[in-house]
Amino acid sequence: MKVVLPIFLFPPIEYLHLLKSAAQVKLCSGEYFQKQTFRNRYEIATANGKLRLTVPVEGSKNHRTMAEMGIHYRENWPQIHLKTIASAYKNSPFYDYYEMGIQKILLAQEQNLVQLSLNSLTFLEKGLKTTFKFELQPNYQADYGPEWIDLRNYAFDGSAYPNQKSYFQPFSDRTGFIPNLSGLDLLFCEGPNSLS
């Protein structure tokens, strides 16, 4: 299977499954930024259920490509994200092992959304002890031909991966298992062998 994917920040498990299992993957940095997507958001499990964390971007009202999207730091969102992640995962089996890595990524004050997203993907790749093979597409291309499955506009809501195996989540006694969260959830709860 050959797939075309958007570039996501700490992508959901369904996305990681596609990235791992596809024969060829193209990640598009030349596409236009789309609001209300995982391009600048990721979801984690908390005591109150699923929580969406958002990275504020510069210039989202103008038509800008993903590669042109800047990140603003007028709010101290990295600290808010880190505190929220710590509150949600500090009791999970592998949080302590990966805590410094997530701090390094979020506190680096990366100025470009694509680079922050690629850094998050590299972090998950190393943590999950796997290899994500992809080609970065810097220019927009409307059609990749019939041999490619174009998922740039797909919601990644978990519907294409309905049989995701459940695993322990810190608040599953209250919320039940919440599927298709950010790969961070899988990493903190299951550790490096979770994709096997």
Image: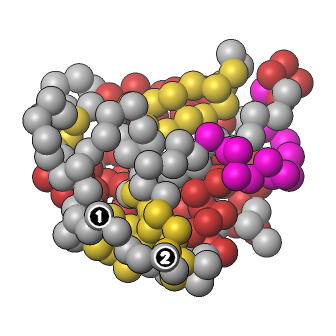
Question: What residue appears at the point 31 percent right and 40 percent down from the top-left corner?
Answer: 34
Residue 105: percent from the left, percent from the top? 37, 52
Q: Is residue 44 left or right of residue 170?
A: left
Residue 81: percent from the left, percent from the top? 43, 31
Seen as rendered, the residue at the extreme top is: 48
According to the picture, the residue beneath numbered tag 2 turns out to be 146
Q: Secondary structure at mark 2?
A: loop
Quarter of the rendering occupied by the N terminus: bottom right
The type of residue carrying mark 2 is: Pro
Q: Is residue 163 left or right of residue 29?
A: right
Q: Is residue 168 above or below residue 173?
A: below
Q: How many marks?
A: 2
According to the picture, the residue beneath numbered tag 1 turns out to be 142
Quarter of the rendering occupied by the C terminus: bottom right
Residue 30: percent from the left, percent from the top? 22, 62
Determine the main secondary structure of the stretch shown in magenta. loop
In depth, the one of 76 and 54 nearer the eye is 54
| Corner quadrant of residue 175 | top right
**CA–CA distance between discs 2 and 1?**
12 Å
Quick check: can you spot residue 79?
A: no
119 in the magenta segment = no
Q: Give the magenta-colored segment's residue range.
A: 157-171
